[in-house]
Image (spheres, coloured by chain):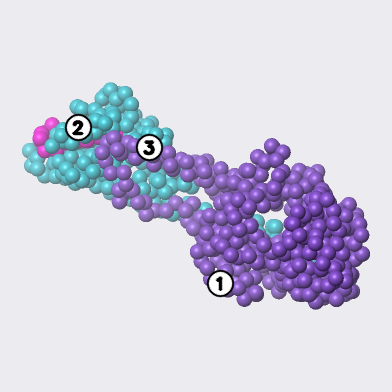
């Protein structure tokens, strides 16, 4: 009888152990996701500093004529950096299940990338013919069909960046994260739907079948 | 905010983890009692009933195995020939010359439950052992089971089934399944929740069987029904992990499916029949019915959830391939490999590895006891059992429910 009584405690004991182990698992998961958030945050701070540096650099250019080559080179270098970080952020976001700590980081990066785009436009005006800007505006919260379409957009543009190297600056920006600046740009460029690729602030491409045209425009 | 898929996943993980710890605690707490069987305090007289339908190839061996038992007080063996169309009856009649305690009832085909009820009316033994006509109890099995009846409240004791015809892959996988079933049943014995006394070899207290009016002829699995009925009447049901019986398992997939559908329908019939005691009446209401119901619902739920994920992945892959083709971009790239696993993948991996080790532990304990180490060592079969074989369970539940709705009880 005593044995049975103690065996019946197994229902509660198993529950307590499960809550404990499961809780530890979930906490580890949250800690891992938060660590990734911290990593992205640190990268962002560094990128923000560089962006500020680039901004000041263009202001100095307005006051004093410094070398176009240097400014373009630094701008492209920064573009490559934030593109790499965008890929890392995407990987981390794909692995995120317990928290949404990265969404805020994404919004901050989007602001930074928008700022970078504006800076690139300025530099292009001062130092024309050095590089092309390819801005890819997509939906952060996409359905299945849209996601598949955006993956192909993203793959195509990544390949293009690999092929063209310093000739293009690729700037991916989420268009649906409720940021005033991106909304203004979407209105300014009369963008009717997402995803869209804007090449040199002139040409807009909405369809997958048109993507091949970007390559010739960025030669 | 956590999304729906992740939430479902975590809930399933929690339940799986709960049952894993539930069994582990039972093992740790009762490790010295796993193979325990009490010595019979009295020499209980036992009538062995052998319901037989078209069993000409096995009936002689079955009877021989029963009479070879080392239990000294087998009062009689009653073969109930349930209108067999082959030579079962004839063979059984001939065996009467060899075995004086053998009786044969020849009757029109009316099913196993009715055959048992008819034999029960004339059985002389205090205990009733029932063995399927294609099942061979081992020499000491009946003796090991009999001791459990020292406890007046015990009404049924069941044994561990091993598969005899391990002639192909399907039967050897079923062997793994039977071992795990036996092991789990023993663990449930420690909380007095043995919810099925198997057909190959179980012993019942005759007075208890008569009290519950024998076997229900309207259900397709009389063994599940009678066990639940005994539990409902306040009796205990036990399991002896050290009493073995060998039987034949389906060798073809279709026959296997049919058998599982029958078990599935029987389980659902029992849930419906005993629904009134849900969360009432001892272990039957508080554990057995919720446990069996939850197992069925979870099995089907996991299947639907997995199907949803697979379909989603398939449609997504198709769409990506379609758009990649239009854009003339590569469909798969090295960059697509994400080396940052989600916590859910981590949980799944941990659970799978522990299940794999746990299965190995069970096989080592039971197969090892019978010196059948090839079962233990075969990693491929264990992987197949965990990843493929178990995935068929929910499908069987679906078809069982469908057949029940249609009223199709043909076998």
Chain displayed in purple: B
- Disc number placed over residue B319 in the picture, else none: 3
Q: Magenta segment, which residues?
A: A125-137
**Residue shown at 18% from the left, 44% from the top:** A163
> Residue B114, percent across and down?
83, 51
Q: Which residue is mark 1?
A: B374
Q: Nearer the viewer, residue B288 or A5?
A: B288
Instruction: Look at the image and give the colour of chain A.
Output: cyan
Front disc: 1 or 3:
1
Q: Nearer the viewer, residue B182 or A147?
A: B182
Please check whether the numbered discs 2 and 1 fall on a single chain. Answer: no
- How packed mark 2 is, by other alpha carbons closer than 10 Å (few <14, some 14-19, many 20 or more), is few
Front disc: 2 or 1:
1
Chain for disc number 2: A
> Residue B55, percent across and down?
73, 60
Q: Label 1 near label 2: C-beta < 8 Å?
A: no
Of label 1 and label 3, which has the lower sequence position?
A: 3
Give SS at disc 3: helix
Considering only vertical position in the picture, is A131 above or below B107?
A: above
Chain for disc number 1: B
In the picture, measured across the screen, residue B248 lies left or right of residue A30, that is right
Q: Which residue is mark 2?
A: A213
Q: CA distance from mark 3 to mark 2?
A: 22 Å
**Residue shown at 16% from the left, 33% from the top:** A217
Please check whether the numbered discs 1 and 3 fall on a single chain. Answer: yes
Q: Where is residue B126, by image quadrant?
A: bottom right
- How packed mark 1 is, by other alpha carbons closer than 10 Å (few <14, some 14-19, many 20 or more), is few
Give SS at disc 2: helix
Front disc: 3 or 2:
3
Chain for disc number 3: B
Q: CA distance from mark 1 to mark 3?
A: 46 Å
């Amino acid at each position: 009888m005593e044995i049975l009584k103690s065996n019946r405690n197994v229902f509660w004991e198993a529950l307590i152990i499960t809550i404990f182990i499961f809780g530890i698992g979930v906490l580890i998961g949250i800690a891992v996701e938060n660590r990734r958030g911290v990593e992205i945050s640190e990268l962002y701070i560094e990128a923000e500093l560089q962006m500020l540096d680039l901004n000041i650099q263009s202001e100095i250019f307005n006051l004093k004529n410094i070398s176009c080559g240097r400014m373009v080179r630094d701008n492209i270098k920064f573009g490559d950096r934030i593109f790499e970080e965008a890929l890392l952020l995407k990987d981390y976001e794909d692995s995120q299940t317990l928290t949404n700590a990265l969404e805020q980081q994404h919004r901050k990066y989007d602001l930074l990338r928008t700022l970078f785009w504006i800076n690139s436009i300025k530099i292009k005006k001062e130092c024309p013919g050095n590089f092309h800007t390819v801005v890819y505006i997509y939906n952060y919260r996409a359905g299945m069909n849209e996601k598949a379409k955006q993956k192909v957009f993203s793959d195509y543009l990544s390949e293009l960046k690999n092929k063209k190297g310093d000739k293009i600056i690729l700037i991916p920006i989420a268009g649906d994260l409720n940021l005033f600046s991106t909304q203004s740009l979407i209105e300014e460029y009369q963008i009717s739907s997402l995803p869209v690729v804007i090449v040199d602030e002139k040409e807009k491409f909405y369809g997958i079948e048109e993507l091949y045209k970007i390559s010739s425009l960025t030669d | 905010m956590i999304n729906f898929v992740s939430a479902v996943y975590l809930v399933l993980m929690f339940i799986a983890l709960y049952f894993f710890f539930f069994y582990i605690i039972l093992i740790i707490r009762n490790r010295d009692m796993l193979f325990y069987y009490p010595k019979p305090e009295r020499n209980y007289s036992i009538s062995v009933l052998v319901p037989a339908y078209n069993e000409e190839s096995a009936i002689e061996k079955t009877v021989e195995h029963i009479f070879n038992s080392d239990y000294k007080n087998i009062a009689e063996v009653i073969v109930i020939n349930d209108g067999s169309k082959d030579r079962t009856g004839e063979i059984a009649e001939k065996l009467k010359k060899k075995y004086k305690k053998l009786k044969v009832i020849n009757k029109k085909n009316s099913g196993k439950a009715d055959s048992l009820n008819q034999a029960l009316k004339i059985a002389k033994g205090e205990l009733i052992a029932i063995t399927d006509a294609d099942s061979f109890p081992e020499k000491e099995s009946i003796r090991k089971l009999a001791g459990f009846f020292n406890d007046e409240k015990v009404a049924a004791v069941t044994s561990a089934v091993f598969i005899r015809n391990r002639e192909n892959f399907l039967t050897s996988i079923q062997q793994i399944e039977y071992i795990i079933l036996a092991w789990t049943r023993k663990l449930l014995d420690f909380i007095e929740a043995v919810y099925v006394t198997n057909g190959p070899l179980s012993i019942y207290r005759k007075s208890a069987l008569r009290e519950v009016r024998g076997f229900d002829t309207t259900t397709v699995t009389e063994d599940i029904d009678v066990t639940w009925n005994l539990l409902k009447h306040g009796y205990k049901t036990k399991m002896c992990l050290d009493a073995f019986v060998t039987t034949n398992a389906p060798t073809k997939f279709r026959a296997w499916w049919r058998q599982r559908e029958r078990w599935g329908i029987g389980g659902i019939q029992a849930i419906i029949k005993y629904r009134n005691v849900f969360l009432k009446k001892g272990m039957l209401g508080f554990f057995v019915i919720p446990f069996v119901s939850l197992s069925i619902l979870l099995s089907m739920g996991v299947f639907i959830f997995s199907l949803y994920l697979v379909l989603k992945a398939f449609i997504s892959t198709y769409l990506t391939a379609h758009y990649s083709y239009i854009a003339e971009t590569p469909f798969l790239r090295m960059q697509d490999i994400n080396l940052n696993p989600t916590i859910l993948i981590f949980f799944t991996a941990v659970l799978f590895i522990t299940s794999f080790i746990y299965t190995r532990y069970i096989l080592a304990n039971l197969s090892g006891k019978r010196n059948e180490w090839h079962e233990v060592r075969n990693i491929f079969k264990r992987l197949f059992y965990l990843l493929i074989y178990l995935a068929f369970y929910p499908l069987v539940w679906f078809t069982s429910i469908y057949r029940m709705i249609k009223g199709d009880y043909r076998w």
